[in-house]
Amino acid sequence: MSIAEVAEQPIRLGKSLVVAVDGPSGSGKSSVSKAVAQRLGLAFLDTGAMYRSVAWHCINAQINLEDAVAVEAAARTIKMEQSMVPETEFFKVNGVNVTDAIREPKISAAVSSVATTLGARAELVRRQQALIADHGHRIVVEGRDITTVVAPLAEARLILTASEEARLRRRGLQLGGTQTAEQLAEQVLERDAKDATVVDFQRAADGVYTVDSSDLDFEETINAVIAVVRRAVNAGQPA
Ligand SMILES: Nc1ncnc2c1ncn2[C@@H]1O[C@H](COP(=O)(O)OP(=O)(O)OP(=O)(O)O)[C@@H](O)[C@H]1O
Ligand SMILES: Nc1ccn([C@H]2C[C@H](O)[C@@H](COP(=O)(O)O)O2)c(=O)n1
């Protein structure tokens, strides 16, 4: 069945609908997942922003990012608030609005130190699972370990990927052409290599679909993801 034909099928909605999306940097996880959440009327959780928020706090509070005990303590103690509505975006750390600050290249360069601190990961996974429950298990969640660790029982699980060339080009455009090729490679490819030492987000686990957006535009990618959600949900429910 083609993507267009699958997209025409109704989604048989149960009570819970968790859509778990993982993939490498720049593949389009945040932007595409947000649009999918909007179209399906679901909440939206950007888990990378939580890792970024911890990194921002550590830098701001002059906590050594190589000190695993201190980074874990930061992850446990900071107050994090974030919009879970796909139409609005904000993130706060201890009441400070960090929506723009956590996207800066200096945070992208530092955030893997948080992502590779296992104690911090455990705390953020715990918080993410609580947020999913708070939103009635009707949510799109994107990150690196959502399909395998945070929500392995999600109704729909997929890896969103794209070629290195496409990911570097998209990230370059997203940052308004301000970054050199070396800086982009550091922020996208080197960060992925470091993050991949603690979590596998390049290969689909059993039962996880793959959407490769290398040759798809933004709208086509959204439709491809929604087609996968329909297929997964309808496959998991009695006819
Ligand atoms: N299929 C697509 N075609 C063209 N551009 C796309 C496509 N998908 C996403 N984009 C654009 O690519 C850029 C990167 O996307 P996004 O920030 O969602 O990636 P990401 O996977 O969440 O990255 P990271 O994990 O580093 O945060 C955005 O500007 C987004 O609009
Ligand atoms: N579930 C997650 C989400 C994110 N990370 C890491 C990977 C990145 O280095 C960092 C920021 O993520 P981004 O905003 O670029 O998607 O956080 C992770 O390990 N697990």
Image (cartoon, rainbow, N blue to C red):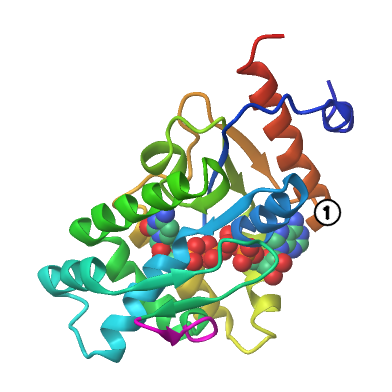
Which residue is rendered at x = 70% and y = 33% of the image? Answer: 228
Tell me if residue 21 comes above or below residue 67 in the rendering: above
Residue range of the region highlighted in magenta in the rendering: 94-101
Q: Tell me residue 116's x, y (percent).
A: 26, 61
81 or 71, which lies in front?
Answer: 81
Q: In the image, is residue 143 above or below residue 71?
A: above
Question: Within the image, what quadrant is residue 166 found in?
Answer: bottom right
Q: Amino acid at mark 1?
A: Glu
The quadrant holding residue 186 is bottom left
Q: Quarter holding the C terminus?
A: top right
Q: Nearer the viewer, residue 85 or 204?
A: 85
Identify which residue is drawn at 36% across, 82% down: 56
Which residue lies at the image location 34% right of the left edge and 82% below the top edge?
94
Q: Is residue 189 visible?
A: no
Ligand 1: give its quadrant.
bottom right
Provide residue 104's location: percent of width, then percent of height. 50, 85
Relative placement, left or right, of 103 versus 33 is left
Instruction: Assess whether residue 100 is covered by the magenta stretch.
Output: yes
Where residue 204 appears, as percent x and y from the top left, is: 50, 34
- The overriding secondary structure of the stretch rendered in magenta is loop
In this image, 177 relative to 57: left or right?
right
Which quadrant of the structure image shows residue 230? top right
Which part of the image, by quadrant, shows the N terminus? Answer: top right
- Residue labelled with disc 1: 219
Residue 201 against residue 207 in the figure, above or below: below
Tell me what residue is drawn at x 52 percent, y 49 percent: 135
Closest to the observer, 144 or 120: 120
At label 1, counting other C-alpha atoms closer than 10 Å, the crowd grade (few under 14, some 14-19, many 20 or more) is few
- Image position of 57 (left or right of 95): left
Q: From the viewer's perspective, tell me whether residue 54 is left or right of residue 169.
A: left
Evaluate whether residue 57 shows in this view.
yes
Secondary structure type for disc 1:
helix
